[in-house]
Amino acid sequence: MSVPRPDGPAKVGGTFLYAGDLRVPGMLHARTLRSPHPRARVRRIDTAAARRMPGVAAVVTAADVPGTATYGLIVADQPVFASDVVRYQGEPVAAVAAVDARTAALALAAIEVDYERLPPLTDPEHMVSTGTGTGTKPLHPDGNIFREIHLRHGDPDVHGEVGVTDSYVVGMQDQAFLGCEAALVVPAADGGVDMRVATQWLHSDRGQIAACLAIPEDKVRLTLAGVAGAFGGREDVTLQIHGALLAQVTGRPVRIAYDRVESFLGHPHRHPARMWYRHTATRDGLLVSVHARVLMDGGAYASSSPAVLTNAVTHAAGPYLVPNAVVDGWVVRTNNPPCGAMRGFGVPQVAFGHEAQMDRLADALGIDPVELRRRNALQPGDVLPTGQVVPDPLPLREAIETVASRPLPPPVSARTPATSLPGGRPAAADPGRVRRGVGYALAYKNLLFSEGFDDSSTARVCLELGPDGDPRVVVHSACAEVGQGFVTIAGQIVRTELGVGQVVLAAADTTVASAGSTSASRQTWMSGGAVRAASVTVAGQLLARAALLLGLPDDVVAEPRRVLTLTDGEIVGTEAGVRIPVADVLADGPVEAVEVFHHRRTQPLDPAGRGDVHVAFAASAHRAVVDVDVDLGLVRVVSMSLAQDVGTVLNPMSLRGQVEGGTAQGLGLALMEELVVEGGVVRNPTFHDYVLPTAADVPVLDFVALTYPQGDAPYGVKGVGEAPTCSATPAVVAAVRNATGRDLRRVPIRPDDLVELGAGGDLGAGEQAEGT
């Protein structure tokens, strides 16, 4: 059932406290000085003038970092502050704390940095060819390649009778969450810090902060502050170490918060990608081989690039049965902004490529694109190019058939209102110059952490008497609520297992063990699993206590579930003819349990890119209908239909919010969202120039949930937030391609790719078909 969010009224009413709203008396305001250059040698940093300014409490640089000088989500390769070189525009060089934000800004301006500008290396192809520095000095001691994977499956020399070959480009997308990064840090008497911060992984942050401050982890106490969106952009440490260091140096509370420009410069983005594909098939439309080359730009530092490449390479052939595959993938270091986690985590990029290829192959074969996908869709028991066997359930064929069967919107006519045409009333075209297109895409996305990562989540559940004397349950988990709905799911699980209506979710913090990251579509499965396990343990302990109070035999006390059940605040034994209120059983004190939940173990990829690498998958299929104004190059998405494999639905309202959001972000990547980087410099770091879809751009989603419980997940759940992003982008592009006949091989699509006087796609013509 749809349980309303407990934080919903405060968020709608404007009273919810986000991280940026936090204030305490006497706090200082912190700001970070960032390099204006994408690559330079730092010859001198002079902070004397800033330190002398009235109201400036501290100025810190690399020399002031007491512990490890670098940090990182997977690889600790990123300096807290640059000391000798800067490797991207926006790299932190110093930070200040002052009595107010204006003084802090003036102090930044007073810091003198002598840079020797160096030519930025921004071409990923160049970094692949130079490797760890052959012919070019490495940008970093760790080298210029974060990771490369070479997957081999079947016979690389076998090809089908018909083939299509083409290249594709995906631009840099930003998570563009509405609330910028912020934290409030208070120094503690024990030499540690107490921090309230908007993040996706409290314990990962804690470990990195403690290492850089050279203090034990238990002296870094983090509490989740209100998070105004995340989408992967808060997985990495950004301002946490700077704020904590300034709080320690000054001995005063420090508020550190980014504005929008600094947010764009301060967190990693979605990886841009360049891809080459060759698909071959039999004449009756069965895939024979897929060859692919995937090159991702990781920017200056590693972030989660190695894991993103795993997803890109292992999903590169798409959700199809491919007997022979060759996939080569690289993610490389450049002087562009760092890239890391974003919704879909490497899969949206390759989904754009493999779905464009399926449409081209359908054209070459003269087969309907839906039918081609249906014929080749993976089924449980099939073998993936990694050698992993497809787990059950994965209803890919049902997904594509479902969206294809949905009713189509009415066509454009002379009676179509101007507000419903591309451009709306201000720029509406002649309806006769509007082209309608329909496009389809099928994708699948892995769930949870992969490649042998020992993933776990911990939860504490305490059943006690509340202040009103009634039973209540307090749930304590470090799960970061970033909008995905754990605040509702946790309560639903507890009420299901313990039959107690009053549930309190304690603040997520580091006084309880880790819940892992709110990413990888994992928290309902993992932290939900931990809450369920702890609730089951509490129920067992409660029933055993009740059996003792009721004087039942020892064998019942040992196995009380044989006789007793929890129902609506009471413990009932129908056969024993007993009934006792839960409140009476709690008179002797609360019942508490802490449980750790693990998913099944997976395997790292071997040198041939093979292994049982992923825990499970979710399927999604989109159909997009678009209208294109071929005079102005404007696109209106008329309708979006989605069929998605969602496991068991625990909260229909939360489910709908997730699939709508995922679809909107995929639409944005297709048509408008791009962080433009030229020569390593970000040209549009504001919402004035970084264009996001609004309610006017995203149609009401026609959504069908495919509900097949996941056997090894609690309640049969599946994560739902990422899969729709993977199929939305290629579906929209396919629809625009269908409307215009243009060779669209780059996203986001630009207006000059579409106008009839334009030259078409900016990559030139591709090789459309091969074979005899």
Image: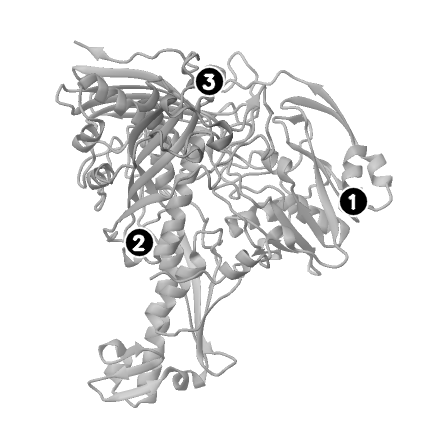
Would residue 721 be visible to someone looking at this image?
no
Any mark on residue 752, and which?
3
**Mark 3, mark 2: which one is toward the viewer?**
3
Q: Position of residue 276 (x, y in %)?
A: 35, 19
Q: Quadrant of residue 64?
A: top right
Is 316 situated left or right of 575 in this image?
A: right
Q: Quadrant of residue 771?
A: top left
Label 1 and label 3: CA atoms lie apart by 50 Å
Q: Residue furthest front?
A: 415
Position of 582 relative to 762 (above/below): below
Label 3 and label 2: CA atoms lie apart by 44 Å
- Residue type at mark 2 is Val
Label pair 3/2, CB-CB below 8 angstroms: no
Position of 536 relative to 379 (above/below): below
Q: Dividing the image into 4 quarters, which one contains the N terminus?
A: bottom left
Task: Please report the residue visible at 49 percent of the width from the left and 59 percent of the height from the top.
Answer: 8
Task: Tell me if mark 2 has few (under 14), some (14-19) or many (20+) residues whose alpha carbon lies within 10 angstroms of its own.
Answer: many
Q: Residue furthest left?
A: 284
Any mark on residue 717, and which?
2
- Residue type at mark 3 is Asp
Residue topped by disc 1: 58
Label 2 and label 1: CA atoms lie apart by 50 Å
